[in-house]
Image (spheres, rainbow, N blue to C red):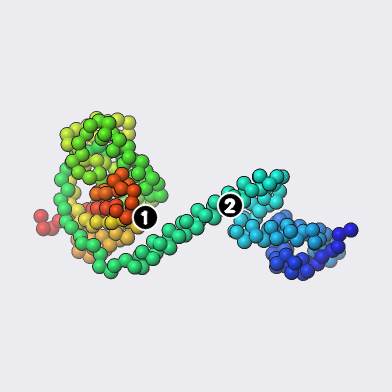
Amino acid sequence: MRAQVTIGDFSRASHLSVKTLRDYHEVGLLEPAEVDPDTGYRYYSEEQIPMAQVIRRLRGLQMPVADVRSVLAATDSEARNRLIVAHLDRLEADLARTRAAVRELRALLERPQSPPAVLHRTAPPTNAIAIRQTVDRDDVLAWWQGALGELHAIVRAEGLRPSGPSGGLYSGEIFQHGRGKATVFIPIDGGARAIGRVVPLRIPQAELAIMLHRGPLADIDLTYGELGAHVLRREISVEGPVRENYIAGFLDTEDPDQWETEIGWPIFRSDR
């Protein structure tokens, strides 16, 4: 006959608090070996200590209760290991995101106080091939990368002659409401025909205040902020899409630190 262990003694043996043991009983994760029907006291057996130790470690890895229950209910070690490895993969992904956020925050705190220079440019109307789509803000980066790669493939396949760096036009709705029109384009000499979602497009003239962003696009919002602050202080902002010119990007070098992106904010040029 198994010896009864009080919840207090089981707590000391398993390093799980009494409150935690009660919670695990309520959710069906670790049920006592016996519950006194008159007093409601919970009693455990020493055979439950290894299970309690497993649960404590899984919960220490922030595994949800439902997943811990699935691990304990697994009928073989292979299924159990798959569940644990899947959770560890999620933890590693979370850790990678946390490290990236820490790097970005450190870079923000160490960023020079003097912002890059602002240039003024009249961008003339330009013939181009383009891909246009309404996209969610969270999907813009992946969409941009795919669209830009597709455009460059068409340029090579059709023997087109680029007349400048590739670029993008992004409506204010993307920033204001999280979804809006985006256009990625490559300016070309002469005309072109439509192929799939790639279409010929006339990029309109625009007066722009321009700031150069160096490095990966993960922190391009910092340059956007500096340019926006400049425009609000010293320029007359006008309606229209923000323009980006990709001087050097992922198709030119695998080192994101070498990327260069011009950001153009539409303005009214009072000096013209």
Residue for point 25% across, 37% down: 129
Q: Position of residue 246 (x, y in %)?
A: 26, 48
Q: Is residue 11 left or right of residue 2?
A: left
Residue for point 11% across, 58% down: 271
**Residues under labels 1 and 2: Cα distance?**
26 Å
Question: Could you tell me the amino acid type at mark 2?
Answer: His
Question: Could you tell me the amino acid type at mark 1?
Answer: Ala
Q: Secondary structure at mark 2?
A: helix
Q: Position of residue 194 (x, y in %)?
A: 27, 31
Q: Is residue 179 visible?
A: no
Contact between marks 1 and 2 (CB within 8 A): the answer is no
Q: Which residue is mark 1?
A: 218
Specify few, some or many for label 1: CA neighbours under 10 Å numbering under 14, 14-19, or 20 or more.
few
Q: Is residue 246 visible?
A: yes
Q: Residue 225's quadrant in the figure?
A: bottom left
Q: Position of residue 37 (x, y in %)?
A: 85, 61
Q: Earlier in the sequence, mark 1 or mark 2?
A: 2
